[in-house]
């Protein structure tokens, strides 16, 4: 597990320092406006999803659709930043219309920790450099699913029965911010 993530999990969940979690959730990162400015200069559109008192910020980066004859591909990249732990992760997505006459789903889509085209690759590199200069550390998408075996989720959630790194540092499954 990432050392910084391990340190924050130790502090918050094993030593029960819920105040630091709550305090960090209330903060708006000082670099956020500049990050949006940078991202808007390199992609079609940036949308910010940030609920007050949430442990993470999500930004969606939209790109020009690729169109060739009857093929159209939509590309989106998602950036998740933990306000609790100064960690971030990228998820890249694509969607294609499903033209199969026997289709069940209207689109074919997928996601990965790796970019699907050069526009996504460029955004990830520029934003990663920016965030590293803000003293954040990058996680790989696969690290988000690492299970923290000695910490239980108090109540059953839609996120499953196990505490993962994503659940611990990017979500508030314990309702810490509500208390």
Image (spheres, rainbow, N blue to C red):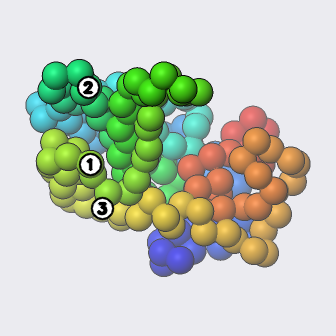
Indicate which disc residue 116 carries: 1
| Residue 33: quarter of image | top left
Quick one: 53 or 59, which is closer to the camera? Answer: 59
Q: Measuring from the top left, give residue 50's x and y in whole percent.
A: 48, 30
Q: CA distance from mark 1 to mark 2?
A: 14 Å
In which quadrant is the C terminus drawn? top right
Numbered badge on residue 55: none
**Camera sees residue 81:** yes
Residue with the mark numbered 2:
72
Q: Residue at x 13, y 35 (%)?
A: 42
Where is residue 99 shown, x and y percent of the image? 40, 24
Q: Residue furthest right?
A: 155
At horizontal 60% and vertical 69% (from top left) the residue drawn is: 146
Q: Say whether marks 1 and 2 touch (CB < 8 Å).
A: no
**Dot 3 or dot 2, earlier in sequence:** 2
Residue 135's disc is 3
Residue furthest to the front: 101
The earlier-in-sequence mark between 1 and 3 is: 1
Circle 1: is it few (<14), some (14-19), or many (20+) Cα within 10 Å?
some
Residue 142: x, y in percent? 49, 64
The quarter of the displayed image where residue 145 is located: bottom right
Residue lying at 75% horizontally and 74% vertically, measured from the top left = 149
């Amino acid at each position: 597990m990432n050392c910084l993530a391990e340190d924050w999990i130790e502090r918050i969940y094993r030593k029960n320092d819920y105040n630091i979690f709550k305090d960090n959730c209330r903060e708006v990162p000082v670099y956020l406006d500049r990050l949006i400015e940078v991202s808007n200069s390199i992609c079609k559109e940036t949308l910010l999803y940030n609920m007050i008192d949430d442990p993470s910020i999500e930004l969606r980066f939209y790109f020009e659709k690729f169109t060739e004859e009857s093929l159209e591909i939509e590309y989106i990249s998602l950036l998740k930043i933990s306000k609790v732990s100064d960690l971030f992760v990228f998820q890249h997505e694509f969607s294609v219309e499903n033209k199969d006459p026997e289709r069940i789903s209207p689109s074919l889509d997928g996601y990965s920790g790796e970019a699907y085209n050069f526009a996504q690759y460029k955004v990830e590199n520029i934003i990663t450099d920016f965030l590293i200069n803000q003293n954040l550390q990058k996680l790989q998408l696969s690290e988000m699913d690492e299970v923290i075996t000695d910490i239980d989720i108090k109540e059953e959630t839609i996120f499953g029965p196990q505490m993962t790194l994503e659940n611990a540092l990017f979500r508030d499954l314990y309702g810490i911010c509500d208390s």
